[in-house]
Image (spheres, rainbow, N blue to C red):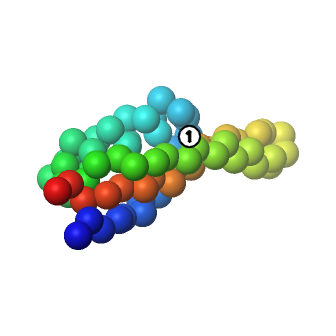
Amino acid sequence: MQQIKFKTFTEDSIERLEKSVNDFLKSDEGSAYSLLNITIKQIEERKFPNIEEDYNAIVTLVTKE
């Protein structure tokens, strides 16, 4: 029976977010799973005088058979 796993990642750029997800999938823990779905959300936080952006990914993984 396959099992699912949810994992979240947060980075300050989409490129770093992509690298974090790929690094996890290559890791010992991540290699036991296949990517089922990924949802990316851009979060803007306004702190005068700056606007800070973060990117959040919710990754849905399923165990490999």
Q: The N terminus appears in which quarter of the rendering?
A: bottom left
* Residue position marked by numbered label 1 in the rendering: 12
Question: Which residue is nearer to you in this view: 23 or 40?
Answer: 40
What residue do we see at 47% from left, 57% from top?
8
In the image, residue 59 above or below residue 14: below
Which class describes the residues within 10 Å of circle 1: few (<14), some (14-19), or many (20+)?
A: some
Residue 45 x/y as whole percent? 75, 49
In the image, residue 37 above or below residue 29: above
What residue do we see at 37% from left, 35% from top?
19
Q: Is mark 1 on a helix, strand or loop?
A: loop
Q: Which amino acid does label 1 sit on?
A: Asp
Compared across the picture, whether 28 is left or right of 52 comes to left
In the image, residue 10 above or below residue 2: above
Question: Which residue is nearer to you in this view: 43 or 38?
Answer: 38
Q: Is residue 10 visible?
A: no
Residue 29 x/y as whole percent? 20, 57
Residue 9 x/y as whole percent? 46, 52
Task: State the residue lying farthest toward the front.
Answer: 1
Compared across the picture, whether 25 is left or right of 59 comes to left
What residue do we see at 30% from left, 68% from top?
3
Q: The C terminus appears in which quarter of the rendering?
A: bottom left
